[in-house]
Amino acid sequence: MRLWLNQELDRYKELDRDFGAGKPDPKGKVMEHEVALFKGYGFKIGQKIRIEDSPRSGDWEVVDVTDHKVTLRCPLSGKEFTWGRFCYLVEETRQKWPAQD
């Protein structure tokens, strides 16, 4: 059992080294790490959006928004889909919409 615990401790030390050296607080419990932060995007009805790098990728128009759901319309087919809110803003640009892929 003791050997297994030592192996687990060594494994966690390696993980800490791989993801940035942590710095314990005065109590020795909290570690600092590089952390990616994400915030949900505040959709607005009528907004034109482009989703990239996703199974839902493409151009969409926002047709309804609730606290937990967003309804998007495809500008080409007119089909509407309601999904749990899932997007995060990367950047805002001025460009042609819908894209002519």
Image (cartoon, rainbow, N blue to C red):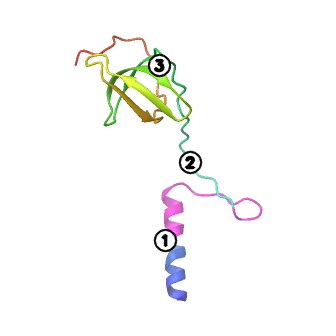
Q: Which residue in the rendered view is the most extreme toward the right?
A: 26
Mark 1 belongs to which amino acid?
A: Arg
Residue wearing tag 3: 92
Residue 94 on image: x %, y %? 42, 11
Above or below, 50 against 84 in this view is above
Residue wearing tag 1: 11
**N-terminal of the two: label 3 or label 1?**
1
Asked if the magenta segment contains residue 16, the reply would be yes
Location of residue 58 (image quadrant): top left
Name which residue lies at 46% across and 16% down: 47
Question: What is the tally of numbered marks visible in this picture?
Answer: 3
**N-terminal of the two: label 2 or label 1?**
1
Q: Which residue in the rendered view is the most extreme toward the left?
A: 101
Residue wearing tag 2: 34
Name which residue lies at 37% across and 12% down: 95
* Residue nearer the viewer, 31 or 52: 52
* Residue nearer the viewer, 50 or 1: 50
In this picture, which residue range is highlighted in magenta? 11-29
Mark 2 belongs to which amino acid?
A: Glu
Above or below, 18 against 49 in this view is below
